[in-house]
Amino acid sequence: MSDVMEKLVRGLSPEKRVNLARMLLRSVGESVPEKKTAEPIAIIGIGCRFPGGVSDADSFWRMLRAGTDAVGEVPPSRWDIDAYYDADPSKPGKMYTRNGAFLEGVDLFDPYFFGIPPRSAVNMDPQHRLLLEVAWEALEHAGIAPQSLAGSKTGVFIGGATGDYTQLIQGKGAESIDASYLTGSLLTFATGRLSHFFDLQGPSLGVDTACSSSLVAVHLACQSLRSGESSLSLVGGVNLILTPQGTITTCKARMLAVDGRCKTFDAAADGYGRGEGCGMVVLKRLSDAQADGDQVLAVIRGTAVNQDGHSSDLTVPNGLAQQAVIRQALADAGLDPKQVGYVEAHGTGTSLGDPIELRALGAVFGEKRDGAAALQVGSVKTNIGHLEYAAGIAGLIKLVLSLKHGEVPAHLHFKRGNPYIPWNELPVEIPTQLAPWTARDGKRVGGVSSFGASGTNAHVVLEEAPEVERKGGAERPRHVLALSARSEKALKELAGRYAKGLGEEVGDACFTANTGRGRFAHRVAVVGRTGEELREELARYASGGGVERGAEGQARKAEEVVLLFTGQGVQHEG
C-alpha cells in the first residue's frame, strides 16, 4: 500500500474503512456478505407516572402538547423547605433551590392487590410500589392480561437505585428493621419482585449507570429479545426524592439550577432541576407483535451503549463518545443520519454539558444534510425536570408519543441561545411551539440520548409504527364492556375513569377491556349500542346507582365467569 493510500485509509472512520474494504473486494470479484440490520423491536404498551398529574400515556401527551411546566416548590410531605433553604451555596447542610418536580400520592399503595402483607409494605421503598403499579398498567395498556404471562420468558429490565426510603426507615431506629427491610429496599429486589409477582421467567436485571440507567435498560432488553432470551420485556425506570440529603449534595456540587428548572440550551442555563417519576414500556419483537395483532406504538430500530473513558474529569461529558454512541445506534438501525428528524436530547441545562451535546449532534447530523430541513432538538426535562435514573425512559416515552401523534411538543424555557453553542454552524433547531412532524423519506425517525454522570452513554433510534390495514369488524347491534377489580370501591373508580375516557369507537375498547385486563372478583358489565349509552351506564354505576343495561356481581373465585350474556338480554349467575 502506498504512503498516500495508507494516510488516506488512516484518516477514515471505522465505518468508512469497512465500506472501502467491501468495495475493493467486490472490485476483484469477491462476494461480500451484507450486514444484517438488527431486528426491529415494537413498543406495544406504556405505563407512566410523571409530575404534573400524569398518570398514563394520554395524560402525559396532553401535558406535553399544552407545554406545561410541572416544577413547583418542595411539598411539605417531603421536607420543610424553610428549614433547609439558604440562598448562599456555601452554607453547610443547606440547599439553594426551593423547587423540583414531584409526584403526588407516593405514600398511597394497596398492598392486598399485590398480595403483600401490610407490615412488609411499610418497609417497602415507594419506588418498588410504583414499579408494581406502573408495570401492571403498562401490560394492560398493551392489551395483555397480566395473569397470562405466568411462566413465560418475559424479561424485566429496570433502571434505578436503592433510594432515600432506606434513610427514613433507619431513622426510626434499629427496632423498626426486620427481614422485609432487606427485600423492600435494594433495587435487585424491586426487579425480582416484579418477576415473582407476575411469575416471569426471563432475565430480571436492575441497572444503575446514574442518569442513563433506564435507557441502558432499554438497550439490554432489546438485545435479550433479539437473541431469543426473552419473548417479551418490561422495561423502565424509577426515581423518587424523599429526603433532603440528595438535593443538598447536588447543591454543594453546584449542579442544580437556582429556580429548579432545566433551561436547556438557553443562555440562562445554570444547572438542572430534580424530578420524580416512573415509566415503563412493554417490548416485543416486531414480527411477533404483528403476528399476534398487538398495537404497535413505535418501533425501536437501533440501540447503543458506550463509555466516556478518560475525560478531563469523571463527571465531565465526552463529546467524541457521544458522537460514537449515536453513530453506533444509527448503524445498528441501518439508517442514515439525514433520515432522523428529531432528537430527544439528554439536555440537563448546564452551561458545560449543553454545548458539548449540541456539538456532538452537529458532528453526526451535519453530515449529508445539505439543503435538508434542520434537525429538531428538544428535551422533556424542561417540562418535568431531570428524573435522574428514570430520565431516559421519560425521554423515550415522549418520543414514542411524538411519533404516534406526528407532532413535536414545545421545548420550554428557551429564550436566548447559550453563547457557547455555535448556533450558525449547527444544523439544529429548538422547537419553542408545538409543531407538526414532517416525515422524511416517508417515515418519521427520531433518536433519544441519555448520558450518565458516571460516563455511561446510551442512544436509541425509533421509527413510527408501520401502517396497519384495518379490517372492518363485524357490525354489532350492541357492545358489551366488562370490568373487574378487587373491591367494589376500586371497581366504581375504574368505571368512572372509563365513563370519562371512552370514545365513540367502542369496539376495540370493549375487546381490550374484556380480554386484556386482569380478572378479579368484583365485576360489572354494561351493554350499549353506542359509546354514549355505555358512558351513561358506567357513570351511573360509578356514582352509586344500579346497572340498568348490564349486570354486576361478585365471583367466588377470580377465574369464575359471573356474567352470561344471551342474545340481547343479560342473565346474572352466582
Image (cartoon, helix red, strand yellow):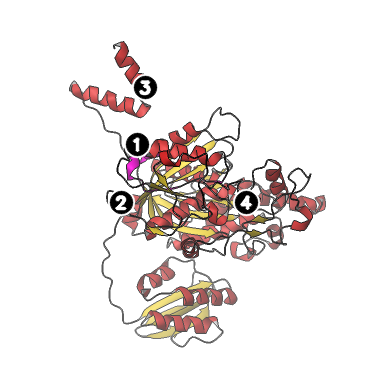
Q: Nearer the viewer, residue 198 or 293?
A: 293
Q: How dense is the environment of label 2, judged by Cα within 10 Å: few (below 14), some, or many (20 and up)?
A: some
Between discs 2 and 1, the one toward the N terminus? 1
Q: Quadrant of residue 128?
A: bottom right
Please name the residue that numbered disc 1 is placed on. Answer: 367
Disc assigned to residue 274: 4
**431 with respect to 52 (left or right):** left
Whether tag 1 and tag 4 are in contact, CB under 8 A, the answer is no
Contact check, label 3 and label 2, Cβ < 8 Å:
no
Question: Could you tell me residue 286's position as x and y percent?
Answer: 35, 50
Q: Residue at x 41, y 38 (%)?
A: 425
Mark 2 or 1, closer to the camera = 1
Q: Is residue 229 left or right of residue 351?
A: left
Q: Which residue is mark 2?
A: 443
Element at label 4: loop
Q: Of the residues under marks 2 and 4, which one precedes in the sequence? A: 4
Residue on which disc 3 sits = 11
How crowded is the residue under tag 4: few (<14 C-alpha within 10 Å), some, or many (20+)?
many
Magenta residue span = 328-351
Q: Is residue 397 visible?
A: yes
Q: Earlier in the sequence, mark 1 or mark 4?
A: 4
Please tell me which of labels 3 and 2 falls first in the chain. 3
